[in-house]
Image (tube, grey):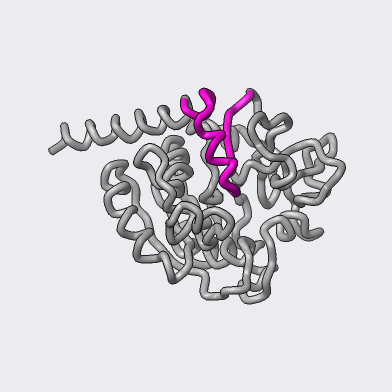
Amino acid sequence: MKKKYAIILTAGIGTRINHILGVVAKQFIRINSIELFLYPITGLWNIGVEFFLIVTNPVIMDKIDKVLKYHSKLLGYVYEITFNPYPNSFNGNTMIIGLKHLIKYSKNDPVFLSVSDHIFDPDMPSELLKCTYDGDIIVLGDPQPMLVDINEATKIQANDKYIVIEIGKQLTKYNYIDTGLFLIKNPYKFIRLFNEEEPIKLSDIIGNKNILAYVQPFTKQYIWKDLDTFDDLEILLRKEMRNIIIKYEKLINSSRYTQVKKL
């Protein structure tokens, strides 16, 4: 089996929520003693990702590294950190920067991609492994999200062959919600087509006419939540989300126990 790689997008700050909680960036909100950005990393590690590239910003780069040194030793993965130097850019630029950095290791192998402000069931990324389409990028889509604020969500309109027709927050006609989890099947193509210095959103990249994007629908219902506002944090207290958070605690604690036994 090929080695699994992932890019985690952590270059944003989260200005609508970080100042309320007194953290330097949204990624450092601690939920049951686990920083927010560690949830997608742990979830992808759970399906066998061994190498993570964290693309962040210069302000929080050292703080991200400090947290990852401990977490990576517990779970046994390898990571590198790079940063997006363009202050007026978007998550699309962050992705291209990540692909250009990672390509020296991954070549043109598929690469998982995740935002850093979503908490999802740790089994959810395995849905991407079920995809059989030969597109450039696969978007994990939820047809019926339970806890997501639709007004805040990125929406997807796909045809009956699961090809993405449109993607964006302002869509009025859609059949899936973007979960923030992706599988990039053709990394070289993105590097060739897009310039990291020109501001571009991830949704604009996926919706570009030169990109063949597919939706991978859920094969069963999963619980997940994006964290954009203070109200989103209150939803974490619901039973459904508490159960997800407990799953992560068990994953990390089980790994910690394994590491102690090895010593």
Q: Is residue 127 left or right of residue 165?
A: left
Q: In x, y percent, where is residue 82?
A: 44, 67
Residue 24 vs residue 168, the one in the foreground:
24
- At which x and y percent is residue 10? 50, 58
Query: Is residue 87 something that shows in the picture?
Result: yes
Q: Residue furthest front?
A: 20
Asked whether residue 133 is drawn in magenta, I would say no
Toward the viewer: 217 or 36? Answer: 36
Q: Which residues are magenta?
A: 221-242
- Asked whether residue 239 is drawn in magenta, I would say yes
User: Quarter of the image containing the N terminus?
Assistant: top left
Residue at (53% x, 40% y) in the render: 233
Image location of residue 229, percent across then percent down: 59, 48
Residue name at image x 80 percent, y 51 percent: 170
Q: Quadrant of the C terminus?
A: top left
In the rendered image, the residue lying farthest to the right is 173
